[in-house]
């Protein structure tokens, strides 16, 4: 009988406790939409001969976690010419520590090439040094080092909580194969008297170079063409003095000197005709044409990025498999 009374007392107490819990209002956690305080110091993207495989896009990034939270994963989205590529950066990113990472994302499909393996074993030349063959061959490319080249897609902290950037799509960015223009556009469809079908800007140190393919669409011979090419947030002018007969394809490599403080910097753009524009044309009969859409001067060049990773040759690349589907949103709860 005593045992029955004890159990009845326990049940009554449990019922009272349940009722009190039910009457207590539950405060829902409010999502924290503030972006994590991760400061990017330098962001540089590369492909081609600068990375291990032909279908790789590499990211060299220097950053510092300025928040009080330790992160275990950061997904970066970096500019690749006019496209973007995503990189998974897993590790332990503690506060107030500057970190240099070298990340790879594979944009095609790679497989082991038996002929390259055999050539490597006997010491013969094995192409680009990799024993892998790829379904996609990306061009040689090194971007500038501006921090604005990178954005955070999402972060995960050490406890597994995730923050998703509401300004960016969470699906992983894929890099399609570069497309080259097949032939010059008809002269009747262009208001500019010179058509540009190829444009590739590069420099090593303070030696700037521009490779262009030009077609004079006017009915008279030109002897001087000023070509303006895009570089990061600025532009660079090149003067091409030669004989440009009408309807003749001319391939030239132009050179000029750059700022002295570029000596430890390097850059190689993808071949994109939209990166170049004709600033002015001078003809042998003394007439000229000035582009009304462009200012007379290209403006100042971007200043070098402080504390950049220029000149560092990455040795240990981190390769991650990009997931097919992105995770469901689960923003940080407020403390």
Image: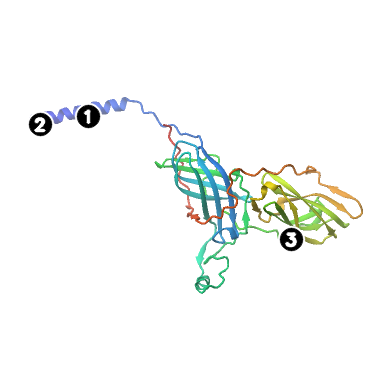
Point 15% across, 29% down: residue: 8
Give residue 14's mark.
Answer: 1
Position in image of residue 211 (x %, y %): 73, 57
Upstream in sequence: badge 3 or badge 2? 2
Label 2, label 1: how far apart the Cα atoms are: 17 Å
Give residue 304's mark.
Answer: none
**Does residue 260 appear in the picture of this structure?**
yes
Q: Residue furthest right?
A: 285
| Viewer-nearest of discs 1 and 3 | 3
- Label 3: element kind: loop
Point 67% across, 52% down: residue: 205
Label 1, label 3: how far apart the Cα atoms are: 82 Å
The residue pinned by badge 3 equals: 183
Position in image of residue 178 (x %, y %): 63, 57
- 187 sits to left or right of 27: right
- 49 sits to left or right of 36: right
The residue pinned by badge 2 equals: 3
Position in image of residue 174 (x %, y %): 56, 53
- Label 2: element kind: helix
Residues tagged 1 and 3 counted as in contact (Cβ below 8 A): no
Label 3, label 2: how far apart the Cα atoms are: 96 Å
- From what the image shows, is residue 1 above or below residue 143? above
**Does residue 173 appear in the picture of this structure?**
no
Q: Across the whole image, how many numbered discs are drawn on residues? A: 3
């Amino acid at each position: 009988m005593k045992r029955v009374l004890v159990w009845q007392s326990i049940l009554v107490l449990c019922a009272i406790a349940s009722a009190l819990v039910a009457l207590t209002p539950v405060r829902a956690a409010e999502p924290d939409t503030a972006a994590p305080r991760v400061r990017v110091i330098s962001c540089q993207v590369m492909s081609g001969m600068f990375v291990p495989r032909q279908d790789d896009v590499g990211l060299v990034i220097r950053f510092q976690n300025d928040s009080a939270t330790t992160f275990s994963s950061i997904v970066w989205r970096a500019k690749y010419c006019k496209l973007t590529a995503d990189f998974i950066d897993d590790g332990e990113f503690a506060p107030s520590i500057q970190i240099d990472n070298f990340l790879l994302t594979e944009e095609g499909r790679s497989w082991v090439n038996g002929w390259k393996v055999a050539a490597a074993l006997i010491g013969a030349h094995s192409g680009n040094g990799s024993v892998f063959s790829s379904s996609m061959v990306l061009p040689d490319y090194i971007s500038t080092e501006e921090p604005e080249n990178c954005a955070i897609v999402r972060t995960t902290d050490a406890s597994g909580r995730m923050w998703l950037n509401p300004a960016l799509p969470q699906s992983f960015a894929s890099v399609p194969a570069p497309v080259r223009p097949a032939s010059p556009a008809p002269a009747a469809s262009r208001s500019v008297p010179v058509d540009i079908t190829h444009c590739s800007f590069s420099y090593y140190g303070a030696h700037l170079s521009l490779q262009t393919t030009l077609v004079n669409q006017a009915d008279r011979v030109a002897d001087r063409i000023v070509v303006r090419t895009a570089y990061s947030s600025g532009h660079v002018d090149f003067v091409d003095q030669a004989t440009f007969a009408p309807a003749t394809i001319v391939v030239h490599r132009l050179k000029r000197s750059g700022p002295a403080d570029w000596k430890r910097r390097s850059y190689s753009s993808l071949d994109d005709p939209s990166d170049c524009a004709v600033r002015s044309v001078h003809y042998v009969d003394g007439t000229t044409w000035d582009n009304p859409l462009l200012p007379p001067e290209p403006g100042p060049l971007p200043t070098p990025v402080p504390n950049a990773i220029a000149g560092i040759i990455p040795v240990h690349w981190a390769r991650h498999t990009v997931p097919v589907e992105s995770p469901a949103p689960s923003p940080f709860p407020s403390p």
